[in-house]
Amino acid sequence: MIATDIEQLLKKAVLKAAKKKPAEISLNEPSQKTFGDLSSAVAMSLAKELKRNPRELAQEIIAAIPANELIQKTSIAFPGFINFWLQDSAYTQDFGELIKKIDQNKLGVLELGKGK
């Protein structure tokens, strides 16, 4: 899904920029919508380990993210958060995958009004 795909892009970019495989990459919803749709603190966690400036590392990571159909734009927020704004088409793709799972009954029985 969207977060998993972006995590994979981010892992490759971190490996390219930092020359190190990240232990863990997590994406979160920012506290404010002005910071985008998703954000990651991977640059800050790696910067400590690599003894580098987190903002500079975040810039290198962003530069290493390949062009793709999911991410509309990125930015860096102090002290080194990487923020992602998603393309509208990313949500459409994600919704399409959900519908396929429903059609294949991979989510179990769905009953209207039951909240399942």
Image (cartoon, rainbow, N blue to C red):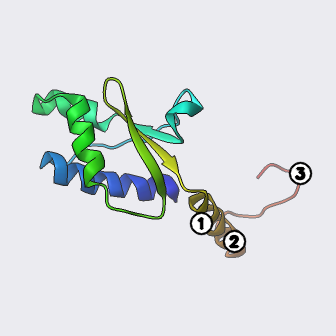
Q: Which residue is mark 2?
A: 105
Image position of 36 (left or right of 20): right
Image position of 107 (left or right of 12): right
Q: Which residue is mark 1?
A: 93
Whole-percent x, y for residue 46 in the image = 20, 35
Estimate how packed mark 1 is, as few (under 14), some (14 to 19) or many (20 or more) residues with alpha carbons within 10 Å: some
Q: Which numbered marker is on residue 113?
A: 3
Q: Residue at x 44, y 55 (%)?
A: 4
Between 114 and 6, the one lying in front of the other is: 6
Which amino acid type corresponds to the residue marked 1 in the rendered image? Gln
Between 58 and 112, the one lying in front of the other is: 58
Q: Quadrant of residue 111?
A: bottom right
Q: Which numbered marker is on residue 40?
A: none
Query: Which tag, 2 or 3, sits closer to the chain's start?
Result: 2
Q: Contact, CB < 8 Å: mark 3 with mark 1?
A: no
Q: Secondary structure at mark 3?
A: loop
Query: Which tag, 1 or 2, sits closer to the chain's start?
Result: 1
Which amino acid type corresponds to the residue marked 3 in the rendered image? Gly
Vertical order, 96 against 80 (above or below): below
**Label 2, label 3: how many angstroms apart (C-alpha)?**
18 Å
Q: Residue at x 31, y 23 (%)?
A: 79
